[in-house]
Image: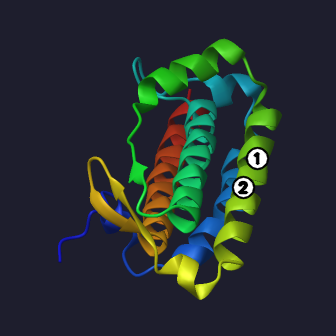
């Protein structure tokens, strides 16, 4: 069966729950010592800054948690996609400080991990139908989140190197 996870290549053989548990700490390490200006500086026009990437991760945790709850607690729900760019633009209007963005991601991540780790066996067997990717189980959501995290952690590393060299 072909994977419906667009981030499967990033996950590779890594254990998804380890990735999900360690992402916030890895972001803290990657951003230590960066100024607010460096965190807010995109690597080039039209690309996201580190701050925007972390805000995007928090947005995605909101979406992934909603989808996971729908799968666990509703019968075969329809899971809709979302356009990340308008969400990012809306977030930029909020002018959320860096420390609040990082804390928001940390709180959301702890919450979704509790949901996953305390789920009952029958909850994990349930599925929803994504409008773009088809059938998705909780395992699919977990693996997608982990691969998505790795993709953006790599992006943060690249952006950090660029803004530090300026």
In x, y percent, where is residue 70? 54, 57
Query: Residue 162 or 125: which is nearer the viewer?
Result: 125
Measured in 3D between alpha carbons, the distance from the residue under mark 2 to the one under mark 1, in whole angstroms, is 5 Å
Q: Judging from the image, what secondary structure is the residue with disc 2 in? A: helix
**Could one spot residue 15 in this view of the protein?**
no
What residue sits 61% from the left and 76% below the top?
18
Residue under label 2? 29
Q: Is residue 117 left or right of residue 50?
A: right
Determine contact: label 2, label 1, CB under 8 Å. yes
Q: Residues within 10 Å of mark 2 (few under 14, many from 20)?
A: few
**Could one spot residue 94 in this view of the protein?**
yes
Color scheme of the displayed model: rainbow
Q: Residue furthest left?
A: 1
Residue under label 1? 32
Figure quadrant of residue 5: bottom left
> Can you say which quadrant of the picture contains the C terminus?
top right
Q: Residue furthest bottom?
A: 121
Query: Residue 114 or 11: which is nearer the viewer?
Result: 114
In x, y percent, where is residue 64? 54, 53
> Can you say which quadrant of the picture contains the N terminus?
bottom left
In x, y percent, where is residue 28? 74, 52
């Amino acid at each position: 069966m072909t994977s419906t996870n667009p981030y499967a290549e990033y996950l590779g053989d890594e254990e998804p729950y380890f990735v999900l548990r360690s992402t916030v700490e890895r972001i803290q390490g990657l951003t230590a010592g960066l100024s607010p200006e460096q965190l807010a500086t995109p690597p080039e026009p039209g690309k996201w800054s580190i701050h925007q990437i972390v805000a995007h991760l928090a947005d995605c945790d909101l979406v992934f948690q909603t989808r996971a709850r729908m799968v666990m607690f509703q019968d075969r729900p329809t899971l809709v996609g979302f356009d990340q760019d308008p969400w990012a633009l809306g977030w930029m209007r909020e002018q959320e400080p860096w420390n609040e963005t990082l804390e928001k991601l940390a709180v959301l991540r702890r919450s979704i991990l509790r949901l996953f780790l305390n789920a009952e066996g029958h909850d994990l067997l349930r599925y929803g139908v994504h409008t773009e990717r088809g059938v998705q189980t909780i395992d699919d959501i977990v693996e997608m989140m982990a691969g998505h995290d790795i993709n953006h952690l790599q992006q943060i590393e690249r952006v950090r190197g660029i803004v530090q060299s300026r």
